[in-house]
Image (cartoon, helix red, strand yellow):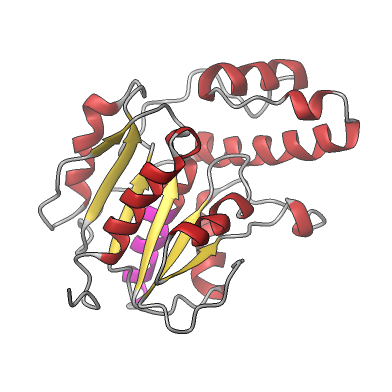
Amino acid sequence: MRRHRRPEAAVSLYCFPHAGGSPGEYVRWSDDLPGVQVWGMHLPGRTTRLAEPPFTRIGPLVDALVSEVSFDGPFVFLGHSLGALVAFETARELRRRGMAQPDRLIVSSCPAPPLRPVRSPLSTLPDDELCAEVERRWGESLDHVRDDPALRAHTLACYRADFALLESYCHTPGHPLDLPVTVLAGEREPWTDRAGDWAAHTSVPMEEPRLLPGGHFYFRERRQEALRAVWEITTKGGRWWTA
């Protein structure tokens, strides 16, 4: 999905949403990212694709993305939380197939693979417990769905499918990517002392992780500051950059 068509854009930014997220939040970033064509990855099982069964395994999802989406270059991948894992695996699959790769991978609010084992699956929790855990872990209020049965069912179905993606994910070691990897995260996130672990997944020297004010959804708390960082990372250092 996209909000604005920008044929003059120097680079495309493909955004991979977080668990339970929709592309709409990310395509709205285009208002603050001049010169960038912003795309939001619109997965089955949500909004206008509600009738389609959602993916619950990353392998088939990545295969569909690489097979069905035309990634026109120059382009950059940005994934937030679960979306960072999907973006990472999509870049790896593009390389495996000998296809064009992104000029940069931006991983937002996500520890590097391999992830720690999931001890308490979220995807199978009863509705009330699932809502409570989402709010507790990521500070995302679900008050707007509690009294609307249809919206509640739709929202929680998205969360369950996405958590199943995460809980079933098993990293397969391989050669590091031959492209820059940049880490973004909120300063209050508990795993940031391990942010540098992403360096193992790129053959390009990795710059220091960029920690921004806020928590897991730092770009909601300090939108302008966060999107300025995204714009700088997306537009600078690529082969299109001439300034």
Where is residue 196? Give x, y as percent. Answer: 19, 37
Where is residue 166? Give x, y as percent. Answer: 51, 38
| The magenta stretch spans residue 90 | yes
Can you see residue 114? no
Image quarter of residue 159: top right
Can you see residue 212? yes
Using residue 53 as the reference point, say whether residue 170 is left or right of it.
Answer: left
- Quarter the C terminus occupies: bottom left
Instruction: Return the residue nearer the eye: 35 or 180.
Output: 35
Residue at position x 40%, y 55% from top? Answer: 78
Residue at position x 38%, y 37% from top? Answer: 110
Instruction: Return the residue nearer the eye: 133 or 23.
Output: 23
- Over which residues does the magenta segment extend? 87-97
Using residue 165 as the reference point, say whether residue 77 is left or right of it.
Answer: left
Where is residue 212? Give x, y as percent. Answer: 32, 34
Using residue 121 as the reference point, say whether residue 174 is left or right of it.
Answer: left
For residue 78, above or below residue 155: below
| The magenta stretch spans residue 10 | no
Instruction: Return the residue nearer the eye: 51 or 221.
Output: 221
For residue 160, above or below residue 26: above
Using residue 159 as the reference point, say whether residue 230 is left or right of it.
Answer: left
Image quarter of residue 210: top left
Residue sitting farthest toward the left: 205
